[in-house]
C-alpha cells in the first residue's frame, strides 16, 4: 500500500547562533524522515552561520540556507523563513534547539493517525 507522506519543513530563523547551530543541524541530519526540508533563515549574522549551514548541507541535501539579505529583525525573519515553505507541515526550531532521533517520523505518524 502506498500511503501519502507530506513534506515537513523545519524552519530555523537565526542571527549569530553558529556556536549552537552546528548541534541543532546535527539533530536534523539524523532524522529518518525522507520528505524533510530544513531551512535556516539567516538574518545577516556576523559570525560563521553560513559556513556552518553549508557544511551541514554538504552532509545532508535536505538542509538549505536562505537570507533576506538585509537585517530585518526577529519577527520578519520568522515570516521570511515561513515564506520559504511550500505545501506540507511546518515547525520552527531555535538556533540552539534540537530534535530527538526519529522525532519527525513519529510526529507525521501521529498526524496521519
Image: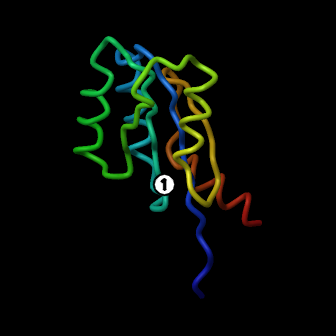
- Where is residue 15 drawn, in percent x and y? 45, 17
Q: Nearer the viewer, residue 46 or 57?
A: 46
Q: Nearer the viewer, residue 10 or 42?
A: 42
- Where is residue 82 drawn, in percent x and y? 59, 41
**Quarter where residue 80 is shown:** top right
**In which quadrant of the rendered image does the N terminus lie?**
bottom right
Residue under the point 56% across and 17% down:
73
Residue under the point 55% across and 50% down:
85
Query: Above or below — where is 8 with respect to 59?
Result: below
Query: Above or below — where is 36 with respect to 6?
Result: above
Query: Above or below — where is 112 with respect to 47?
Result: below
Residue under the point 45% across and 22% down:
43
Q: Nearer the viewer, residue 16 or 29?
A: 16
- Where is residue 20 drawn, in percent x and y? 40, 18
**Quarter where residue 92 is shown:** top right
Q: Secondary structure at mark 1?
A: strand
Which residue is at the far right? 113
Check disc 1 and report the residue beneath it.
36
Query: Above or below — where is 12 with respect to 38?
Result: above
Count all numbered tags in the image, as a single digit.
1
- Where is residue 8 drawn, in percent x and y? 57, 54
Left/right placement of residue 61 relative to residue 110 reads: left
Amino acid at each position: 500500500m502506498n500511503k501519502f507522506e507530506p513534506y515537513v519543513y523545519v524552519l530555523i530563523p537565526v542571527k549569530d547562533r553558529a556556536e549552537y547551530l552546528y548541534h541543532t543541524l546535527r539533530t536534523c541530519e539524523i532524522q529518518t524522515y525522507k520528505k524533510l526540508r530544513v531551512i535556516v533563515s539567516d538574518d545577516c549574522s556576523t559570525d560563521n552561520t553560513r559556513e556552518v549551514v553549508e557544511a551541514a548541507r554538504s552532509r545532508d541535501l535536505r538542509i538549505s540556507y536562505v537570507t533576506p539579505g538585509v537585517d530585518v529583525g526577529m519577527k520578519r525573519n520568522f515570516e521570511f523563513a515561513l515564506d520559504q515553505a511550500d505545501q506540507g507541515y511546518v515547525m520552527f526550531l531555535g538556533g540552539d534547539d534540537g530534535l530527538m532521533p526519529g522525532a519527525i517520523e513519529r510526529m507525521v505518524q501521529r498526524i496521519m493517525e
